[in-house]
Amino acid sequence: MLFAFAVPTALAADANPIQKTLQMLSDLQAKIIGEGTNAHKVFSEFSEFCEDRSKELHFEIKTEQEQVASLKAAIAQETANAGAATTRIEELSGELATDQSDLKAATDIRTMESAEFAATEKELINIIDTLGRAVAIVEKEMAKAGASMLQLQNVHNLADALKVMVDATMLTAADASTLTALVQQQSEDKDEDVNAPDPAVYKSHSGDIVATLQNMFEKAEAQLAELRNTETKDMHNFQMMKQGLEDEIKYGEKELAEAKANLATAEEKKANAEGELGVTTKDLNNDIKVLADLHAECMSKANDFEDESKSRGEELKALAAAKKAIVDNTSGAGSLSYSFGQVSLFQSSRISTRADLANFEAVQFIRNLAKKHGSAALAQLASRMSSAMSYGARSGEDPFIKVKGLIQDMIEKLEAEAEADASLKAYCDRENAESMEKKQAKEAEIEKLTTSIDSMSARSAKLKQEVATLQKELGDLAKAQAEMDKVRAEEKETYGSNKADMEQGIKGVKLALKILTEYYAKDHDHASADGAGAGIIGLLEVIESDFTKGLAEMTATETAAADEYDKQTKENEITRTTKEQDVKYKTKEFTGLDKAISEATSDRAGVQEELDAVNEYLAQLKTKCFPFPRDTYEERVRRRNAEIAGLKDGLKILEGEAVLMQRSVRRSLRH
């Protein structure tokens, strides 16, 4: 009886369970609110970090993308410059080779012509000398009227006359051979010169021989003068052509050196730009990867915080509802169940055996376990155990077996829940990881496509602008060429008209000079004493010189203008061809870019649809798999294991009491 009265005293020392439950609910609410405040502070700091870091990375990526685009444009420009320089080098090398070849050929021809001139001049001089001596010999013999003269009068042709002169040692055999060859040549050319005398047919008189030789002498001198004039003109023309070719070669070599320097500069700039492009591209790819990782991490943290906040809010809502339900509905029952008088009466009426005490201890153990872990299921189990005890006491059934059964059922239920929870977590973790991986991959792909689209759009717009600029330049070039053509035509027409006037003027002045010169040369009596005629002739000579000089300058100016026009026209043609090729290639490039942009935009839309499907699946997975925050799974496992261990300890209490009771029964039977 002393033991029976000790239990109510111990129970009275404990607080009212309802009040304790309310206090525990309030403490849990405060704890959850505190955790939410701390989590919000941490997440705010992390969100600020994400935003700042994202801005930095976006700025760096944008800057690097602009640098990449600029470097690629620079590389393309320098490639074009190098190509143009290479083309120009090839053209200049070809032109230089042609000019040098022309100069060499002209020099060789001039050398050959000079040699021919020297040989012909020497030959004509010898002929003139021979003819002059022959004429002098014949005239001398005619003056003597000797035997040689008689022989000359009896010859029938010039060859015989020359033989006589050789026999008489008046001429050498070599001079006679030379004159004979000349006579034969003149005989062959008589059809070409109708005024030349026939050396084979003449009267055999010394006078005819002298006339023939004199005629040949004058003709040789005329040929020598004409030869020298021709040589002078050829030499002048060669010097003019040589000077022009040397100037072209000098200018071409200068342009070739400049083109090679431009090629080296373009290649150097291109190499530098390519090196910078590699480094910048590497930095850009790294920043894009870092941004993608940061975005994934920040989104994951945001989703976690959202899930935790939602779970925390739902838990607070549930706790508030539970408190309200307890306060509103348990005041009467609490006063009836947990007042000191009721407990004493209950204990004094029902705890009368060791089995009752074991059951009561098991119930209290489960209640304390429920309080410790905040488990509603354990609290419900304790209530059911208490009800089983009350029902067993009233009906006479053994509550011991019923209580053990309840505990065992609860253990099995918790173990089943643990197994189901573990399976669900494994499934959810796997699905969530795979879905997040797909999501990150799709987001990265979208980001990559967006970057590519932006880059191609910028490049296409730039190419279109460049094509418009090139087309405008082509229009300006065509306009300039048309103006050049017009000016050149006008200059040529003016030159033709002025040249005709100058030539007509020179012709008139020469005619006047001839008339005056012949007049004053024949009749000196009409020449004025003060030299007026000579002054007029001198002035006319000055006018002729001025006209000739003016015509030469006019011709040189026309030639220079024509050369400059041809040169500029050729350069314009090269420029036009180059720009048209640029327009063609750039138009083709931006057309391809526009097509690629359209395809990439379509691809991005398809990837976005896939990403939306993944996000939708993640939302469904979140609702299905994470009704509670994911980071409390370990806590639930620990709490559930502790509950199972506590229940097993409760079973041990009951089983230990059963063993003691069986031993007491055996001892009573032996007694």
Image: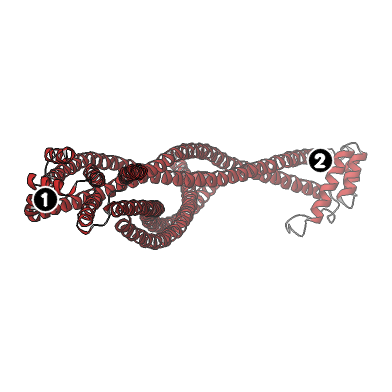
At which x and y percent is residue 654? 31, 45
Disc 1 marks a residue whose amino acid type is: Ser
**Front one among 139 and 123:** 123
User: Where the C terminus falls, by quadrant?
Assistant: top left
* Residue ID for mark 1: 337
Instruction: Determine contact: label 1, label 2, CB under 8 Å.
Output: no
Disc 2 marks a residue whose amino acid type is: Ala
State the CA–CA distance, disc 1 to disc 2.
176 Å
At which x and y percent is residue 5? 14, 40
Q: Left or right: 519 with respect to 307? A: right
* Residue ID for mark 2: 134
User: Where the N terminus falls, by quadrant?
Assistant: top left
Rate crowding at label 1 as few (under 14), some (14 to 19) or many (20 or more) other CA atoms within 10 Å: some
Q: Is residue 239 visible?
A: yes
Decide which of tag 1 and tag 2 comes sooner along the chain: 2
Q: Is residue 443 visible?
A: no
Q: Left or right: 636 with respect to 198? A: left
- Give the tally of numbered discs: 2
Q: Secondary structure at mark 2?
A: helix
